[in-house]
Image: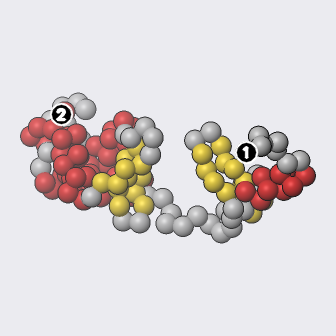
Amino acid sequence: MGSRKPTSAEWADDYCQQIRHVFRRGHHYVWDGQCYQKLDDMLMHRVISEFVSMVDPAAATAQLVKAVVETIAQKTAIPSEPPEPLMLDGRPTQNAIAFSNGVLLIDDFIEEQLREPALLPAP
């Protein structure tokens, strides 16, 4: 990061460019490839301390680590509640299940099944 000492904001930016991270309802979460894993405060401070130490071991002071963690929380904060109603395709929906490859709208699925029931094998 150069010869001058990076600021907590620069450390936070560098971390956020490498790690998918969100801060929601007072907790830090990191993406593990399948889902967001919650990190308690102690673990989050240890992760940032190790992150800073990999680049500059002398810079990983408790004061800097605390500032970086706070900056990451500010930069990655998402609202605690989505705005109501949740809109999909411009329509409000409450009955939906999110999958990795899309969203199943339960009301649409039931309506479709009533119009054209799926053929299931006999028991």
Which x, y percent locates residue 38? 35, 54
Residue linked to disc 1: 123
Q: Residue furthest front?
A: 123
Q: Is residue 69 above or below residue 85?
A: above
Q: Is residue 21 visible?
A: no
The earlier-in-sequence mark between 1 and 2 is: 2
Query: As drawn, is 67 to the left or to the right of 98?
Result: left
Which x, y percent locates residue 83? 62, 66
* Quadrant of the image containing the C terminus: top right
Residue found at x 82% / y 42%? 119
Which x, y percent locates residue 80? 49, 66
Residue type at mark 2? Met
Which x, y percent locates residue 75? 41, 53
Query: As drawn, is 108 to the left or to the right of 81?
Result: right
| Residue nearer the viewer, 4 or 119 | 119
Residue found at x 12% / y 49%? 61
Q: Residue furthest right?
A: 115
Residue found at x 36% / y 36%? 18
Query: As drawn, is 71 to the left or to the right of 56?
Result: right
Q: Secondary structure at mark 1?
A: loop
Q: Is residue 45 visible?
A: yes
Numbered label attached to residue 35:
none
Location of residue 60 by image quarter: top left
Query: As drawn, is 91 to the left or to the right of 20?
Result: right
Residue linked to disc 2: 54
